[in-house]
Amino acid sequence: MNQAEYERMVKIYNYVYSTLPNTPEREKRLAEIGEEDSSKLWDFYCGICSGRIKEPERTNSEVNTMGEKKIASYEDFIKALRYGENNMLCKFRRNNPERYAYYVEQM
């Protein structure tokens, strides 16, 4: 996999996996990318899980235009809880009630 293919797969990976698992939104995004890209995405995901491929960094949604950090993943949610960043957690809960409930359920 060359650099251009890797970057393309990172975009697709972030597009699909930025949604909650087992939701209609994720199913819709998987259907949008097509069968060929879906199989490449599965290989990419397996490569990440096995360590064959380096996991992409989540830089596109971690910082908003004001320079404030925001919660982009479950890991960010756990870090915010651990470090007592209540303001960030309140904003996240207000803006993403479904995702917040899902993350709380995962704990």
Image: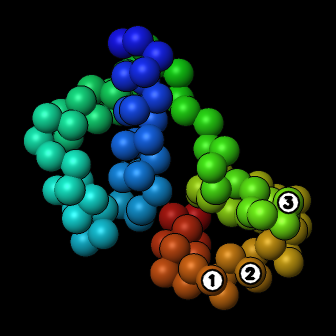
Please name the residue shown 49% across and 81% down the image.
Answer: 98
Q: Which quarter of the figure is the C terminus placed in?
A: bottom right
Callout 2 touching callout 1 (CB < 8 Å): yes
Location of residue 71 in the rendering, given as x and y in whole percent from the top left corner: 69, 63
Q: Position of residue 7 (x, y in %)?
A: 46, 29
Q: Position of residue 51 (x, y in %)?
A: 47, 18
Which quarter of the figure is the N terminus placed in?
A: top left
Q: Identify residue type, mark 3.
A: Gly
Is residue 59 or residue 80 the one in the foreground?
59
Disc 2 is placed on an element classified as helix
Q: Is residue 40 above or below residue 71?
A: above
Say what secondary structure mark 3 lies in. loop
Q: Which mark is residue 91?
A: 2
Residue at mark 2 to residue at mark 1: CA–CA distance: 6 Å
Which of the 4 image quadrants contains residue 12?
Answer: top left
Question: Can you identify the residue that label 3 sits on?
Answer: 67
Secondary structure state at the residue bearing disc 1: helix
Q: Amino acid at mark 2?
A: Lys
Kindly identify the residue that appears in the image at 70 percent across and 54 percent down. Answer: 62
Residue that mark 1 sits on: 95
Q: Earlier in the sequence, mark 2 or mark 3?
A: 3
